[in-house]
Each structure stands twice: as structure tokens, then as C-alpha cells.
Amino acid sequence: MEKFLETINYLKSKITSKPKIAIILGSGLGSLSEEIKEKIVIPYKDIPNFPISTVEGHKGELIFGNLNGVSVVAMNGRFHYYEGYDLKETTYPIRIFKLLGVETVILTNAAGGINLNFEKGDLMIIEDHLSFFAESVLRGPNLAEFGERFIDMSNVYTKEYIEILKPIMKKITGKALTGVYAYMKGPTYETKAEIKALRTLGADAVGMSTVPEAIVARHSNLKCIGITCITNMAAGIKDEILTHEDVKKTASKVEENFKKVIKELVTKI
Ligand code: HPA
């Protein structure tokens, strides 16, 4: 707790109002931060006990301010297990958001489409997730200050908010896709056989983030929304080689719609 408090005290000394919503910006989706007004930008490297993002395309700053009239904090750059952090480090910001008084986290990401009805550039609302192949972020002594040891996982992605999001997506993108996000540890993209297996298991999209954060959000009783940008069809579906460059390129093409969706969503939750 001492570590958390050191971080919180530093952030509280910098900010002027309590954020209601935290938004984690996935690969190539960082430009939403430009829409935030009355900004206070804090580089991760200045925040005591905060990890530092190492991924290209992720900036590494917390942005406090006002998005469409709502007090928010955005993370431009998140922490991934594949970078070498342990899962507790990757989810440290979620704990901090809880202690700052945030009510809802919006988790966004880039992912590969597994559902054959999806197309590159689609946005998918995460309804549920699969996380068979990674250790639990809650392994180890329970942080009782945040939540209980054994956690119900039947409502990780807040159902009432999914229903609010669907018509917003439909209006802005013409579609309201929902699906199951499968978490893989990365940093390799998946093999064709893994994608076939994940489809059989019920996955619609696959990526390397979000799930540990969603579990920590659930543990501390934060409301949670997940939005995936399908930046590519997953391995073996199309005859193409997956690259991080292409992932970022597709995400940036979708960014305008993505920003509109988030800006409207924050006013309705
Ligand atoms: N697999 C895993 N992570 C990803 C992908 C993918 O195909 N695309 C973007 N992130």
C-alpha cells in the first residue's frame, strides 16, 4: 500500500479534479488524447513506482483533463507482459485509478480478427474474454484493500454499458459488433493452428493486452468496457504476413470513428 500511496500522493499534487473515467489507449489509438481539453500531461517516467512503456507506437504518458465535458484520465501507452513486466506491474495503473476515485475503465486495443464475419478496420465491443494460457494477474497474496480472494467473473464487461455502447457504435460505424477477446501472451503473433483452436474455443478476436487490466478492474469493483480495433485478420485467414506496422496503420485509419465513439460514450455512462 505504501507504494500505491506514494504514486497517488504525487498524482494528487499535480491534478485539479478527480477523474471519473480512465481510458487506456491501445496500439495506434493514441490520438484520442489530442481531444482532451485542459490537459495535465504527466510522463510515466516522472511518476513514482510507475512502469515505463517500451513499445513503439505507445507514448508513455498519463493525461488528465476534460473529454467532451467529462473528467477523464487517459493512458497513452500501456504495459504488456511481453515487455518483461510481471502482470502486477502491467496492471499497476488500474489500482492507481481505483485509488484516485475512477468509476469506470475503458480498455481499448488492437487485435486480430478470428470471427470470419469480421473485417480489418471493424470495431468490436468485448462481451467476454478467454484467458486460458496465462497465469492470473491475481495470483499471490490477495490485496484485500481492493477486493476479495475469489472473484465472480460473469460480468467483467459491464452489461448495461455494453447496451449503451451498441447504438453509439451502430450510429458512428454502421455496425455494432460484439465478441469474445482471447488473451495471448505474445510477443509472437499466433500460429495458424492456434487461431483455429481459439476459434473452436469461441474466440472472435485475439490480442496481447486488456485481460489482465480487466481482471484487476473486476477485482476492485470498477465498471469496465472493452473496445477492440480489428487491425488485421488473425494468422492463416488471409494470405498475408502480420506486422506491427500494418497493425498501427489500420488502427490509425479507424481512429476518427474510434474517437467519436469514445467521446459520445463518456457522456452516457
Ligand atoms: N494477434 C495478437 N495480437 C494482435 C494481433 C493479432 O493478430 N493484431 C494486433 N494485435
Image: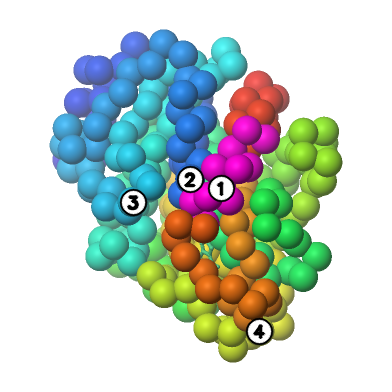
Residue in front for this viewpoint, 44 or 212: 44
Confirm whether residue 256 shows in the render: yes
Amino acid found under the numbered disc labelled 3: Glu
Give me the disc on residue 56: 3
Residue in front for this viewpoint, 99 or 195: 195
Q: Are marks 4 and 1 in contact (CB under 8 Å)?
A: no
Amino acid found under the numbered disc labelled 4: Lys
Magenta residue check for 83: no
Amino acid found under the numbered disc labelled 2: Gly
Q: Quadrant of residue 172?
A: top right
Give the mark toward the camera: 4 or 2: 2
Q: Quadrant of residue 38?
A: top left
Calculate the distance from the C-alpha at mark 4 to the C-alpha at mark 2.
26 Å
Residue 214 pos. (x, y %) = 51, 53
Q: Which residues are magenta?
A: 247-257
Give me the disc on residue 251: 1
Q: Residues within 10 Å of mark 2 (few under 14, many from 20)?
A: many
**Vertical order, 34 against 220 (above or below):** above
Q: Are marks 4 and 3 in contact (CB under 8 Å)?
A: no
Calculate the distance from the C-alpha at mark 4 to the C-alpha at mark 3.
29 Å
Residue that badge 2 annotates: 28
Q: Are marks 2 and 1 in contact (CB under 8 Å)?
A: yes
Does label 2 or label 1 sit earlier along the sequence? Answer: 2
